[in-house]
Image (cartoon, helix red, strand yellow):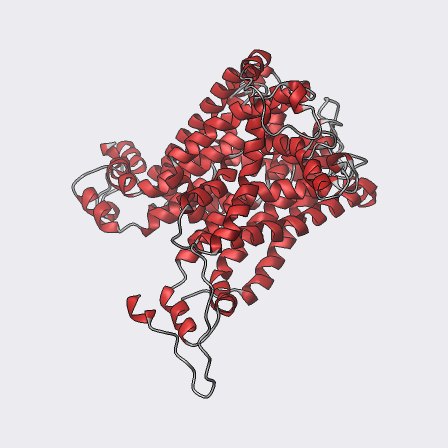
């Protein structure tokens, strides 16, 4: 790097007079990044400000940019008006269970597709890849019918209007199987083979040798599945109608419907709904960013 | 689990296959059995909730079925011909396409611009990046609630800012001519973080010596960007174009929360109309036909993007 810090070479025949450049005391990129960042952050800030205003301040035009007193009572009032604790717990249960199921089931299936030769492997894998290409809207109506039927006839726990309906259909994903299979195939065979020679079973090899090597891929899958599950809206909207079984986005949307005019209450509720995910996101930022970047780079 | 240990292949073949016990052992220890044991739980779920519904909704689309019981009977292509003549479907397609054409380039340009600006060692970088990433952690519902408030026709701060530069207040989501554009803006904001991450990751792969060589050859920053950086980013651009388009064609959450397809159907997009038909009118057959139609659009658009994109995409070997 330092070797190229020499003065700009002047091309022969075109003598360029040395230009005196007016220099900023800071990188000029700040001039575009600061306004852009304000635009990106402003919705959050305005949400926070409104959430601690009185309703009189909020419904005032021109808007009052700095509230006189911080009315944190809005948060307590929002908590009284809607079961946010319950919705939050439901979201956590659904997201954690979905992530756990995906890690286990997709590891097993992905490993078998990556390493075993068994009858019907190609066909099964083809079927899975086919489902990967079909948008959710195509499958949601039969998925609704099947889930409803399951709840009535087989497993009461997963029927429509029960939290199980939010977990089971997503307990394994075609993306997860495909993603892990691709990763497993990049691992060197030697470790697995020598463990097999030493008498380890297939499952032992997977759990003791392959999965520890696949930690980055598992973390990626976990992060993506968690985000997907946490933010999922359309399926919970269809599958759940009782307030006690709702997840946070669905609960928040019904809360919005019921408190359309109580802006401050709604904003306080919104802050409470997005804050946990924001915190989780920043604590595990590395994993989330790496996951999104990984899907992007994998696609290229 | 010890039963599943495999003897070497040729040895297995050589073993006489007589006796039920031996056969039983062979089945349990074969790779076929282990393979199926490993894939069955995961694959069963995907088949039950993914593959079967694909076939089922194809059948439904040729039936006259409502969810409120009643017999369903095959009606041939009646649902599809209804779809072709349904004026709301035509509107929905139009809105979906307008939305996609505005949203996808918007999010890509915003992401590219910010990623290039952030791809350097400057002060406050952590703050800039954090601000962009934060939009990724926000659910569509939270995002829509904030933007409905920002664009509130009576008390919204956007109108206030416009007024302060002499532009009169707008009706935004209440206006048939503006509502769709507000949804474009809110979703671009929501996807900026994603686009920034993808572009920043791709920018890491642009070799620094190449840029320095270009600078030595007298290429200005803009020319270097256009002739070297942008082509090297083209795989990421193609990925983003395809990914964002697939998501744009499936727009639903923001519409459901902010306008419910209104005013005057101005924001009725395909998936919203499909949801209305399926779960408010309970016409499962017709809704399935719309779903398959949507699938067709997504497939065609994606194929075109890959075809066209490949011509402009430079892959480093």
- Give coordinates of residue A20: x percent, y percent: 45, 70
Q: Is residue B225 left or right of residue A206?
A: right
Looking at the image, is B195 positioned above or below residue A24? above
- Give coordinates of residue A279: x percent, y percent: 43, 30
Asked if residue A300 can be seen in this view, the reply is no
Looking at the image, is A202 positioned above or below residue A80? below
Q: Residue at x 41, y 35 (%)?
A: A282
> Along the line of sight, which residue is nearer the eye, A134 or B254?
B254
- Give coordinates of residue A135: x percent, y percent: 59, 42
Q: Is residue B24 left or right of residue A89?
A: left
Q: Residue at x 60, y 47 (%)?
A: B246
Asked if residue A77 can be seen in this view, the reply is yes
> Along the line of sight, which residue is nearer the eye, B99 or B170?
B170
Which corner quadrant holds the C terminus of chain B?
A: bottom left
Q: Residue at x 45, y 52 (%)?
A: B118
Pick out the residue farthest to the bottom.
A13
Q: How many numbered discs, if any? A: 0
Which corner quadrant holds the N terminus of chain B?
A: top left
> Along the line of sight, which residue is nearer the eye, B9 or B51?
B51
Pick out the residue farthest to the left.
A198
- Specify the quadrant of the image occupied by residue B142: top right
Q: Is residue B41 left or right of residue A202?
A: right
- Give coordinates of residue A175: x percent, y percent: 47, 42
Q: Residue at x 40, y 52 (%)?
A: B122
Pick out the residue farthest to the top.
A80
């Amino acid at each position: 790097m330092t070797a190229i810090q020499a003065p700009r070479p002047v091309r022969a025949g075109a003598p360029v007079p040395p230009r005196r450049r007016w220099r900023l005391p800071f990188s000029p990129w700040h001039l575009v990044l600061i306004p852009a960042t304000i635009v990106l952050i402003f919705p959050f800030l305005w949400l926070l400000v409104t959430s601690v205003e009185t309703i009189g301040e909020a419904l005032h035009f021109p808007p009052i940019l700095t509230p006189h007193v911080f009315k944190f009572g809005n948060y307590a009032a929002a908590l009284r008006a809607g079961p946010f604790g319950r919705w939050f717990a439901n979201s956590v249960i659904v997201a954690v269970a979905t992530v756990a199921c995906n890690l286990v089931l997709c590891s097993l299936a992905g490993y078998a597709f990556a390493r075993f030769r068994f009858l019907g492997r190609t066909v099964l894998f083809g079927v899975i890849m086919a489902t990967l290409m079909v948008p959710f809207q195509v499958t949601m109506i039969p998925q609704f019918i099947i889930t409803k039927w399951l709840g009535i006839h087989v497993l009461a726990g997963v029927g429509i209007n029960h939290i199980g309906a939010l977990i089971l259909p997503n307990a394994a994903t075609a993306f997860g199987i495909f993603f892990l299979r691709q990763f497993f195939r990049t691992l060197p065979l030697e470790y697995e083979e020598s463990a097999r020679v030493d008498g380890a079973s297939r499952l032992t090899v997977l759990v003791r040798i392959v999965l520890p090597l696949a930690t980055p891929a598992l973390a990626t899958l976990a992060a993506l599945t968690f985000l997907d599950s946490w933010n999922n809206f359309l399926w919970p909207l269809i599958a759940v109608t009782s307030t006690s079984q709702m997840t946070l986005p669905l609960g928040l949307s019904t809360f919005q419907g019921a408190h359309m005019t109580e802006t401050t209450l709604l904003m306080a509720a919104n802050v409470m709904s997005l804050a946990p995910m924001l915190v989780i996101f920043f604590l595990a930022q590395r994993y989330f960013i790496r996951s999104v970047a990984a899907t992007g780079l994998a696609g290229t | 689990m010890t039963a599943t240990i495999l003897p070497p292949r040729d040895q297995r073949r050589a073993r006489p296959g007589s006796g039920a016990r031996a056969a039983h052992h062979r089945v349990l220890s074969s790779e076929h059995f282990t393979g199926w044991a490993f894939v069955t739980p995961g694959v069963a779920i995907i088949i039950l909730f993914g593959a079967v519904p694909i076939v089922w909704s194809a059948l439904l689309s040729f039936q006259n079925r409502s969810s409120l019981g009643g017999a369903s009977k095959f009606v041939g292509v009646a649902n599809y011909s209804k779809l072709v003549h349904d004026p709301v479907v035509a509107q929905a397609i139009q809105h979906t396409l307008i939305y996609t054409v505005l949203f996808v380039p918007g999010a890509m340009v915003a992401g590219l611009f910010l990623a290039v600006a952030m791809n350097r060692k400057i002060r406050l970088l952590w703050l800039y990046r954090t601000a962009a990433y934060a939009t990724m952690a926000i659910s569509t519902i939270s995002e829509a609630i904030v933007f409905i408030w920002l664009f509130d026709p009576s008390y919204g701060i956007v109108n206030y800012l416009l007024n302060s530069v002499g532009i009169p207040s707008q009706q935004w989501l209440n206006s048939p001519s503006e509502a769709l554009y507000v949804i474009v803006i809110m979703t671009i904001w929501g996807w900026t973080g994603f686009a920034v991450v993808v572009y920043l990751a791709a920018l890491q792969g642009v070799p620094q010596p190449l840029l320095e060589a270009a600078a030595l050859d007298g290429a200005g920053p803009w020319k270097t960007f256009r002739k070297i950086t942008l082509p090297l980013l083209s795989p990421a651009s193609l990925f983003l174009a395809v990914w964002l388009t697939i998501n744009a064609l499936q727009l639903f959450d923001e519409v459901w929360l902010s306008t419910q397809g209104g005013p005057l159907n101005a924001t009725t997009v395909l998936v919203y109309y499909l949801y209305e038909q399926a779960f408010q009118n309970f016409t499962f057959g017709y809704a399935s036909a719309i779903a398959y139609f949507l699938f067709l659009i997504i497939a065609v658009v994606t194929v075109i993007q890959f075809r066209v994109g490949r011509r402009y995409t430079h892959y480093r070997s």
